[in-house]
Image: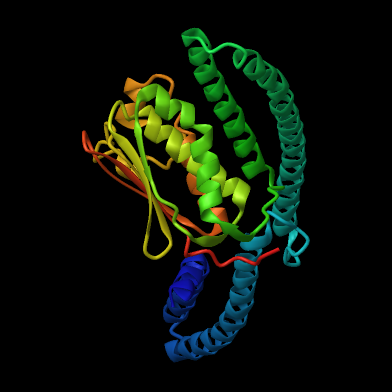
Amino acid sequence: MKLFMRYLLIHTRNVIVYLIFCAVFAVTFALYRLPVSAVGYACAISAFIGAAAVLLDYIAFYRKHRQLEFLMHEITVTADHLPAPKGLLEEDYQALVRIVYDERQKLEDRMNAKYTDLVEYYTVWAHQIKTPIASMRLNLQSEDTPLNKELSYDLLRIEQYVEMVLGYLRLDAGTTDYLIRRCDLDSIIKQAVRRFSSQFIRKKLRLEYEPVNCSVLTDEKWLLFVIEQVLSNAIKYTKSGSISITLEEPKTLCIRDTGIGIALEDIPRVFEKGYTGYNGHSDKKASGIGLYLCRRICENLGHKIQVSSAVGAGTSIRICLDSADLETE
């Protein structure tokens, strides 16, 4: 009904012109003392013919409207299904649409080419930078001095940033190599803990972890990345106390720390890209990318990640691993 009212609104001028013509005929007949009823008959016949014409025109209008609505969903893909133009103005409008569509496609192709080049460059860079990092780590392991320990800690952070760059590039490149299979969760957790073992010792943090004896359907490499990011944050924002790793029902991995916690107003936004919140302002080195990547990866793996926290009481990150609905390879 709304569409029909809009159709009438578009053709309001034609209706007004028709009524004016009827009035002119009525006045003319009255001035010449002719039967005005003849004008009524003529107007009635004209109204009937006009109504039939309006009905047919509205049907054509409705079909074209539906066709254009369908085209709205595919115009970003193709402009080949534009309806046949009726009249010169519609031809001109369609010509404008095709020009804009072609220019958009050219711009998109140029942007995709630039983005592909950028991804390839930084991917190569990230892999190349791993070689000097590995060499530096070997050199630092030759002596067990306080300076070497500090340098090893800084080197670990550099490795994390490189992994974050690779993860970010792989997520948006559309070529993420997921390998979904049954994995031993303890094996993944131990790899992450082993990587940060020196940081537990350095900050004198207690690790509370008992084997969970659980297998999950996931991608080992990407889930390991998520757990490492969560552990890294837990260690970074925990000055003293402990970090615990437990398994809750149903198949929910919980990593809990006794750190500074997260402000209540920051919790809904901690998984947004670039959002650092109050902790990020106090820690100028925070990037706001780590938890964003964790959320994106968990979504792709069919997992859910949640956070609960209170300022001064620590933070708990829960990764629900029982929600995966994926095909194994």
Count of residue discs = 0
Horizontal and vertical percent for residue 176? 68, 48
Quarter of the view holding residue 263: top left
Residue positioned 53% across, 13% down in the render:
144
Say whether residue 199 is visible: yes
Pick the residue in front: 138 or 309: 138
Q: Is residue 325 above or below residue 263?
A: below
Horizontal and vertical percent for residue 255? 38, 46
For residue 101, side relative to residue 48 (left or right): right
Horizontal and vertical percent for residue 293? 52, 41
Which quadrant: the N terminus? bottom left
Pick the residue in front: 99 or 168: 168
For residue 329, side relative to residue 195 (left or right): right
Horizontal and vertical percent for residue 141? 60, 17
Say whether residue 275 is visible: no
Pick the residue in front: 134 or 76: 134
Picture colour scheme = rainbow
Residue positioned 59% across, 26% down in the render:
159
For residue 320, side relative to residue 297 (left or right): left
Pick the residue in front: 198 or 222: 198
Q: Is residue 222 above or below residue 202?
A: below
Which quadrant: the C terminus? bottom right
Residue positioned 50% across, 85% down in the render:
43
Quarter of the view holding residue 83: bottom right
